[in-house]
Image (cartoon, helix red, strand yellow):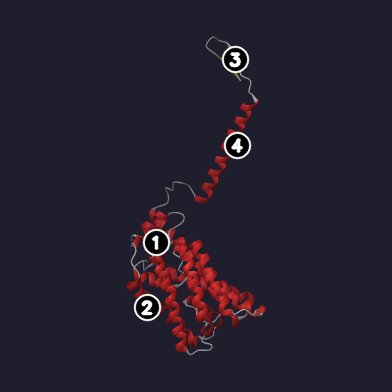
Amino acid sequence: MVHVNENTEVIINVPTENDALMDQRRDMTHRKHSIRGILKHIIRGPKHKPDMTRTDEKIHAEIRRGAAEFVGTFVISLTLSIIGVTHALTKEKISLPMLTAVVDGLTHAVLIYTISAVSGGHFNPTLSLAFAVKGAFTPWRLLYYWFSQFAGGILGCLLVHSVFGDAEHLGVPHPMSVTNVQALLFEVIGSFIDIMVILAVAETSYIVGTHAAIAVAFAHIVIGILFSGAAESKFNIVLAVSPVILTKTHFDTIWIYLTGPVLGAFIALLVSRIFITKRDREETVKEATGTSMLNPAEDEESDDE
């Protein structure tokens, strides 16, 4: 490199090996930051979105909630339907009710850890209703939450039925070794325990967010082992209705699995009002509706309505 100083003396700077190495490092760093910036732009979108109005952001947040409920309920329905079919095909000696209870609990735990931050992780129409009655969930959301849950549940069951074609083992609920009244009692008690645990988790300041997965998983395992063997109890209207619709069987006893969860949920609401200390309402609302992983501010604005 050539420089001319004030005395018109020509000074020639010969680049050294260190200078070349420094230039190379600067060039690599610049490229690295450029690539990182491009990837961020692709994944997260532009930092400033002048074309995105506040209304559009709220709509996108609600769409994410509905999608999360659809995916979660679909996975649960698919998993439990597969268990019944594969257990019959492989003729495993392990107890089917116990296996179903464990898988159900673990599946709920995984889903709560992964997508509950988006929608609240209901995957159950009765739980959505309970949160709405409690005032921690906006009632108008029930419409698309229920639609997403039923669509996901039916699709999951339909997928297994279309692959295996064995309607007998899809997990159609019906009293097997108990009377209808006893089956209804099982459904009420199991739903009460399930909803009660979730309401308690949402109200307890030291067990919040994804840590709720542990309590919910154990609750599902316990009630599944206790009650599902004798009456094919589901404690979830979607999981009960989906196989009945697809197999067109046991319509005469479906009322048990529609009435039981609702009664259990309302009993859980009454008990929670008496025994569970109220936490700050904003925290309870966040547990019930989820907090968007992409833009939490959107959810806070949406919940204020």
Q: CA distance from mark 2 to mark 1?
A: 23 Å
Image label count: 4
Q: Percent from the top left, x then y, of residue 5?
A: 54, 13
Is 143 situated left or right of 113 in this image? left
Mark 4 residue element:
helix
Q: Residues within 10 Å of mark 3 (few under 14, many from 20)?
A: few
Residue linked to disc 4: 28
Q: Residue furthest top?
A: 7
Across and down, in percent, residue 29 comes to: 57, 37
Identity of the residue drawn at 60% across and 75% down:
83
Residue at horizontal 44 percent and vertical 68 percent from the top: 145
Reply above or below: 259 against 216: below
For marks 3 and 2 on the same chain, the one whose residue lies earlier in the sequence: 3
**Label 2 vs label 4, nearer the camera:** 2
Q: Which mark is residue 267?
A: 2
Reading the image, the residue beneath label 1 is 286
